[in-house]
Amino acid sequence: MLWAALMRPDLWAATLAMATPIALPALGGTFSERSGVVNIAMEGIMLIGAFFGVLFAHYTNSAWIGLVGALMMGALISVLFAYVTVNLGADQVIVGMGINIFAAGLTAFLLNTIFGYGGTPRDTPALPNLTLPGINRIPILGPVFGAQNVVVYLMLVLVLISHYFLFHTNLGLRLRAVGENPQAADTAGLNVRNLRYLGVIIGGMLSSLGGVYLSLGLLNSFEVNMSGGRGYIALAAMIFGKWTPLGSLGAALLFGFAMALSMILQGGGISANIIQMLPYALTILALTGLVGRSTAPAADGIPYNPNK
């Protein structure tokens, strides 16, 4: 039964689809933590992006405007988070958890207030699926990439761009420098505060994009707490990936595979519940450092005050 499931092309297509809403916030967390700011608000920002994406799409009748609006809301929440943690030096973990709780309550309240208990309209415009020209003729890649949502392809492109940006550009080097040694970076003339703002805002927009994928890419609707803990799993994927874009994608694919396999095995000889537990078990192991052991940026989570 398990071997037959592994041979199904739709398993690997579903793996990529399930990995996308994990890979995007994991990529965002990489930017934030590389700049020295721990951002566990990814779960809440995903909810903000998911809800406002549907809201803007519904009232403008355009999924693309919904996508842009969601990204702007993610950036706005990130500016607030950056101000409290970078400027005021507040505890980053506590502020992040506060945003998660706030976002869960706010989106549930706005959903019932604006759309009523019937939920968001089913005729809300959705982001389209995309078929690459000629991809269906390729035996393995055809079924996997044949009809994925446009955000899936965007995610893959963003991972490559992010890797190049962080490790092959001067701005990426500066961003990583303030996460390793902000005092030395400040002495060298770098604006630590602005670079940390940049990392947090990019991270928030990527997390918001992950939420939009859930609401406008997969379900074409918003549901309360629809992120389902993916923001926290993304945190584990980022740690698995050793704070690198390519590594985060690899870890997200692992989590996505476990989710997809649990759906394929429903009703089979192996309990799907056991497979479904794997992402969360891996999350616990990652956060305790038992697997994927690596060293975070040296100044990650440490507020920097240039006046001290």
Image (cartoon, rainbow, N blue to C red):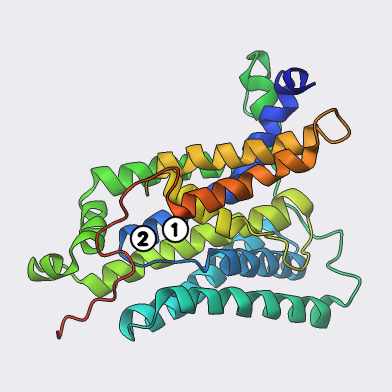
Residue 119 locus on image (x, y percent)? 86, 69
Q: Is residue 147 above or below residue 222?
A: above
Compared to 11, does 180 lie above or below? below
Image quarter of residue 114: bottom right
Instruction: Write the residue at 30% across / 48% down.
Output: 166
In the picture, the disc for residue 33 is 2
Quickly name the residue at label 1.
29
Q: Which kind of residue does numbered mark 2 sit on? A: Glu
Q: Label 2, label 1: how many angstroms apart (C-alpha)? A: 6 Å
- Circle 1: is it few (<14), some (14-19), or many (20+) Cα within 10 Å? many
Rendered location of residue 207, percent (x, y): 54, 59
The spot of residue 55 in percent (x, y) is 72, 70
One can see residue 227 in this view? yes
Which secondary structure lies at badge 2? Answer: helix
Mark 2 surroundings: few (<14), some (14-19) or many (≥20) residues within 10 A: many
Task: Give the secondary structure at mark 1.
Answer: helix
Residue 116: image location, x then y, percent:
88, 78
Q: Residue drawn at (82%, 79%), measured in percent from left and top?
A: 112
In percent of the image, x 55 and y 51: which residue is there?
A: 283
Depth check, front residue: 121 or 267: 267
The image shows residue 114, relative to residue 157, as above or below, that is below
Residues at discs 2 and 1 in contact (Cβ within 8 Å): yes
| Residue 135 appears left or right of 223 | left
Which residue is farthest left? 187
* Tag 1: amino acid: Gly
- Side of 295 relative to 72 (left or right): left
Q: Is residue 209 visible?
A: no
- Residue drawn at 22 percent across, 59 percent down: 180
Residue nearest the viewer, comparing 170 with 8: 8
Q: Establish if 244 lies above or below 182.
A: above
Relative depth, front residue between 178 and 271 = 271
